Amino acid sequence: MIILKLGGSLLSSQILPQWLHLAVKEGKGNVVIVPGGGVFADQVRSTQKIWQYDDQTAHYMAILAMQQMALLFKGLCSDLCLVNQVEAIRPALYQKKTVVWSPLAIELDDANIKASWDVTSDTLAAWLAVQLFADQLILVKSAQLSENATLQQLSEQAIVDQAFADFVQHNPITVNCVNLCHTSVLSASLKKNV
C-alpha cells in the first residue's frame, strides 16, 4: 500500500488531476491519498494571525481544510472513494477502490496528535502510513527539490512541516518526496508493490 500525500500547493497546477486519475487507474486497492489543506488551510493561518484564536481551534479548522480538499479531489475525479475513519480504509482498498482520506478531528485527538502548525498534513500522512503499515509514503510537492536533500533539510526549507523529520525518524516509514511533475514515481512504486 502507498500513501500518496498531495500537497495543497498543487491546486495552482494543472497536473493535479493527472495525479488523481493515475492513482485511480493504476492504484486501485493500493493507494490512499492524503490531501493537504491548500488555500483553505492558508485562510486558517491568516485569520488566526488577525483574530489570535488558540492553536486547538486552528487545528480543528485545518482538519476541516483537509476535508474540503478531499471533497475537491472527489469533485475532480469521481472514481475516488472518500473515507474518514482510519479503520474503514482497508475495507475500501479490499474493494479495489482508490481512497481519499478525509480525517476526523476526534480520531486525531484520540491519537494525541499535537495541535500546532508544526504538525500539518505531511506528518498526518506519515501518521496514517504507520497506522496502516503502508509500504511507502510519497509526498508530492510543488517546490523544486534537491536530489540529495535530507528530511531535516526539507523541514528547514519549509517544504515539509517541522514535526515530520522527527516523526519519521522514530517510525519505520519509507518516504519519497517528489516534485509534482514526477508522476512516473507513482507508477514505478506501484509496480514494485505488486
Image (cartoon, rainbow, N blue to C red):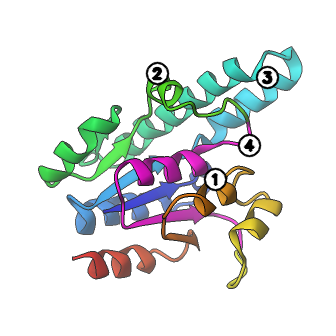
| Residue type at the position of mark 3 | Thr
| Residue type at the position of mark 2 | Ile
Residue hosting label 2? 106
Specify which label sits upstream in the sequence, 1 or 2: 1
Distance CA(mark 4)–CA(mark 1) = 17 Å
Q: What element carries label 4?
A: loop
Residue hosting label 1? 9
| In magenta segment, residue 118 | yes
Distance CA(mark 4)–CA(mark 2) = 19 Å
Is disc 3 in contact with disc 2, using a CB cutoff of under 8 Å? no
Distance CA(mark 1)–CA(mark 2) = 26 Å
Q: What stretch is highlighted in magenta?
A: 117-144
Distance CA(mark 1)–CA(mark 3) = 19 Å
Residue at 53%, 61% (x, y): give it. Answer: 14
Q: Residue 141's mark?
A: none
- Foreground pick, 57 / 20: 57
Specify which label sits upstream in the sequence, 4 or 2: 2
Dot in front, 3 or 2: 2
Q: Is mark 2 on a helix, strand or loop?
A: helix
Q: Is mark 1 on a helix, strand or loop?
A: helix
Residue hosting label 4? 118
Is disc 4 in contact with disc 3, using a CB cutoff of under 8 Å? no
Residue at 30%, 74% (x, y): give it. Answer: 190
Classed neighbour count for the residue bearing mark 3: other residues with Cα under 10 Å, few (<14), some (14–19), many (≥20)? few
| Residue type at the position of mark 1 | Ser
Residue 153: % across, % down: 78, 69
Classed neighbour count for the residue bearing mark 2: other residues with Cα under 10 Å, few (<14), some (14–19), many (≥20)? few
